[in-house]
């Protein structure tokens, strides 16, 4: 009997699971429907707002078309004024270019003068450096010669002193033997 009860229970479980899944799907679908309804409501509000703005723009367009003749006259006068200003500007630009060219020429002359002065200073510095190097080389050579002479003198004194000591030793050794 327990086997039968177990089989009956096992056979009843899948319909319960399906029923539970269907209720979850139903809840999800209802939520999706609510979300869609809110989106539709938002779209409808936006559409109404766009319609109102379109009507306002159409009224504005009608007003603008009525004012187009006066605007055309204003534009024509503004164009004429702009052309005269442009001609004045071009004349000023020509004068400015001439002044700029003169300034550039003067700057170029000054730059070339500075380059000449820099070249002269560089030559002078090169001469001074060569002179200083030559003087340092001569001083170093004189110092080496002085060291060599002092060294020879000291070696000669040492040799003389050694020779004298050797001679004195030989005299002493010969006298005592």
Image (tube, rainbow, N blue to C red):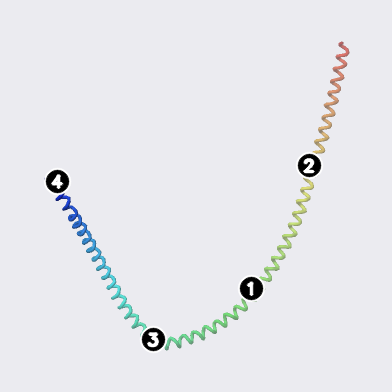
Label 1 or label 2, whichever comes before in sequence order: 1
**Element type where label 2 sits in the image:** helix
Q: Residue at x 55, y 81 (%)?
A: 86
| Residue marked by disc 1 | 100
| Residue marked by disc 2 | 140
Q: Nearer the viewer, mark 1 or mark 3?
A: 3
Q: Residue at x 81, y 41 (%)?
A: 142
Picture coordinates of residue 172 (x, y %)? 86, 14
Camera-side residue of 99 and 11: 11
Q: Is residue 176 above or below residue 81?
A: above
Q: CA distance from mark 1 to mark 4?
A: 111 Å
Picture coordinates of residue 162 (x, y %)? 84, 23
- Quadrant, the N terminus: top left
Q: Nearer the viewer, mark 1 or mark 4?
A: 4
Q: Nearer the viewer, mark 2 or mark 3?
A: 3
Q: Is residue 170 above or below residue 100?
A: above
The disc placed on residue 3 is 4
Label 2 or label 3, whichever comes before in sequence order: 3
Bin the neighbour count of mark 4 within 10 Å (Cα to Cα): few under 14, some 14-19, many 20 and up.
Answer: few
Q: CA distance from mark 2 to mark 4?
A: 121 Å
**Element type where label 1 sits in the image:** helix
Q: Is residue 47 above or below residue 12?
A: below
Picture coordinates of residue 89 (x, y %)? 57, 80
Q: Residue at x 42, y 88 (%)?
A: 70
Q: Is residue 131 left or right of residue 84?
A: right
Q: CA distance from mark 3 to mark 4?
A: 92 Å
| Residue marked by disc 3 | 65
């Amino acid at each position: 009997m327990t086997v039968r009860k177990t089989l009956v229970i096992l056979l009843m479980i899948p319909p319960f699971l399906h029923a539970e899944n269907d209720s979850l799907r139903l809840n999800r679908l209802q939520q999706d429907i609510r979300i869609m309804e809110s989106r539709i409501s938002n779209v409808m509000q936006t559409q109404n707002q766009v319609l109102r703005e379109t009507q306002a723009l159409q009224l504005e367009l009608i007003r603008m078309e009525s004012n187009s003749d006066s605007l055309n006259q204003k534009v024509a006068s503004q164009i004429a004024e702009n052309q005269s200003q442009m001609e004045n500007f071009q004349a000023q630009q020509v004068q400015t270019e001439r002044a700029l060219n003169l300034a550039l020429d003067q700057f170029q002359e000054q730059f070339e003068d500075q380059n000449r002065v820099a070249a002269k200073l560089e030559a002078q510095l090169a001469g001074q450096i060569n002179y200083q190097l030559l003087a340092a080389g001569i001083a170093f050579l004189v110092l080496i010669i002085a060291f060599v002479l002092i060294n020879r003198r000291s070696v000669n004194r040492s040799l003389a002193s050694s020779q004298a000591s050797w001679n004195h030793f030989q005299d002493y050794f010969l006298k005592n033997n």
